[in-house]
Image (tube, grey):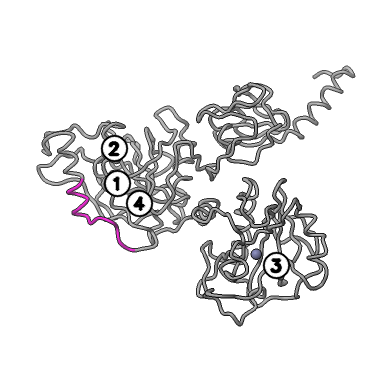
Amino acid sequence: MGADYSKALWVACKNFWPGNKGMDYVVIHATASGGVQTAMQLATGSEFNDGQTASVHYINNRDTSQVIQVVSEANSAWGNCCATGNSPFDHNVNWNWKSISIENVKYSNDNSEPLTTWQYQNLLDLVRDICHRHTIPLVHGSPTQRGILFHHDLDPVNRARCPGTFPYTTFFQDLQGGTTTPILTPTHEVAVYPQSYQYEPNETGDACGFYANALAKAMGNPSGTQPALTTEQVDVLADQYYVQYNGQNASWNTKGMAEPTQQEAMLNSLGIPFTHIAIDSNSDHNQDIALITAWLKLGYPVIVLIPTASVYDMDVGAFIYGGSGNHFITASGIDVRPGFAGHLMYRDTANNGPSPRTYSNDHIVIYHAIAINPPWLPQRPDSFDPLQGGDQVEIPAGWKDDGTILTAPNGHKVVRGFRNYILTHPWDPGDVPQEEEHGQNPLEAYYNQPNNTGTQQIFLYTTLNWNTTRNVYKMGVGNEFLHTRNDLIACRAGAKP
Ligand SMILES: [Zn+2]
């Protein structure tokens, strides 16, 4: 017997029924403890071990990052019994038999305080893990939909304030935005697009940027079948903005789209939110592809500016354009076909073949990229890092942040990816920088990783590293320290270093 969730501490409690009648729902609670109570105190207290009062499967602690499992998922805990009042759930079923329950520790007696940052992150991770193992969809459940419930969904009469204050509006987006893939169209794209081809007789051949922006307006929700605009409407919209910005729409007019000014002005005019991505003509190619891939995995398409000569169409098996011009296209999905898997798929309005097209990641060069924020997904700020999977921002107590520079109480500063990491992960306020970020080669002396150069910043208890392969990560300082200490001992004993 042990924890079903690998990150949980297993503490068996006595209150449960053996077996279950289908694990169809995850039910979220909060304890309303009415005083300081740790998850361990609850797990080992009489309430969960007296053979009659209550129990849950998991307890998510408040003040320190800890998840305790007290009942096996295969057995039924007593967190929620029966539907009351106007709950749409069957009032004659004991829902304990069909659910996995999670208590979030709160100290107020009315569950009025919000979850702490790490409590929320741990809850997201735990719910994803349970749902993944039991193929429960990451959606709000109903009598006809397996999914996730809040206790008040079942018992609005007696448990109206369970779990109480909770990020209800963002919870399901955050759940889906983490490690799961978004809903995709049958073509494995993040949105439904109309077919679109930018060339028409006697009109400019340089309207690709205008078409890419018009396609952003044309995106349809991937769970549906229809784009928001037709092929003809995209054409009209692109032509209209071309004329407005560049004058006559004629074949001799080769002004194209000025980037970023015209590109962003048109998106703003169309009311399409977007996020700048840290890609330019000098940024690392693999990192560029990794960033765009990460945005797509979260469900956001990316408009990219590329040199035409870098387009290798994998279905054609050739570089299809050549030339020395640049071109706007939209990365809209990730191919899954054998031999093509992982290569990005694009809506390219200069390519009249069946869309989307798969262009080889190995050849394509990215000069500039912006992520389009579809209306059905949360808007992401420029500080959002899709490789870190979140933008839950919490400044450690006593630290200061001005939006660019995070300053610790001792005056040391943390910037860019390291700043983002600290703001989006549980971070001990006492874990202060001992120095500024600096280039480091080798990045790790005793862990011989393939791409072993990058930047580093040493904190009191933690060391953050960055390289283009792993992005920002916590270094295995124990390994480094042990080897360093052994070398020092050997050195002092007279061995050659
Ligand atoms: Zn409850």
Name which quarter of the figure residue 432 lies in: top right
Question: Dot 4 lies on which element?
Answer: loop
State the residue position of label 3.
Answer: 73
Q: Earlier in the sequence, mark 1 or mark 4?
A: 4
Up/down of 206 relative to 57, above or below: above
Q: In the figure, is residue 46 to the left or right of 125? A: right
* Labelled pair 2, 4 in contact (Cβ < 8 Å): no
337 relative position to 357: left or right: right
Highlighted range, magenta: 225-237
Q: Residue 92 — which label?
A: none
Badge 1: residue crowd in 10 Å (few <14, some 14–19, many ≥20): many
Q: Which of marks 2 and 1 is nearer the N terminus?
A: 2
Ligand 1 shows up in which quadrant of the image? bottom right
Q: What residue type is labelled 2?
A: His
- Measure how far apart labels 1 and 4 are at the Cα level: 14 Å
| Residue occupied by mark 4 | 315
Q: Is residue 368 above or below residue 317?
A: above
Secondary element at image label 3: loop
User: At 66% from the left edge and 36% from the top edge, which residue is drawn?
Assistant: 474
Residue at the disc numbered 2:
327
Nearest to N terminus: mark 2 or mark 4: 4
| Element type where label 2 sits in the image | strand
Q: Does residue 44 belong to the magenta stretch?
A: no
Which residue is at 43% across, 42% downward? 361
Q: Distance between the residues labelled 3 and 4?
A: 47 Å
Q: Earlier in the sequence, mark 3 or mark 4?
A: 3
Q: Which mark is residue 348?
A: 1
Can you say whether 138 is above or below 240 in the image? below
Q: Categorize mark 3 by other alpha carbons within 10 Å: few (<14), some (14-19), many (20+).
A: many
> Element at badge 1?
loop
Q: How many labels does the image show?
A: 4
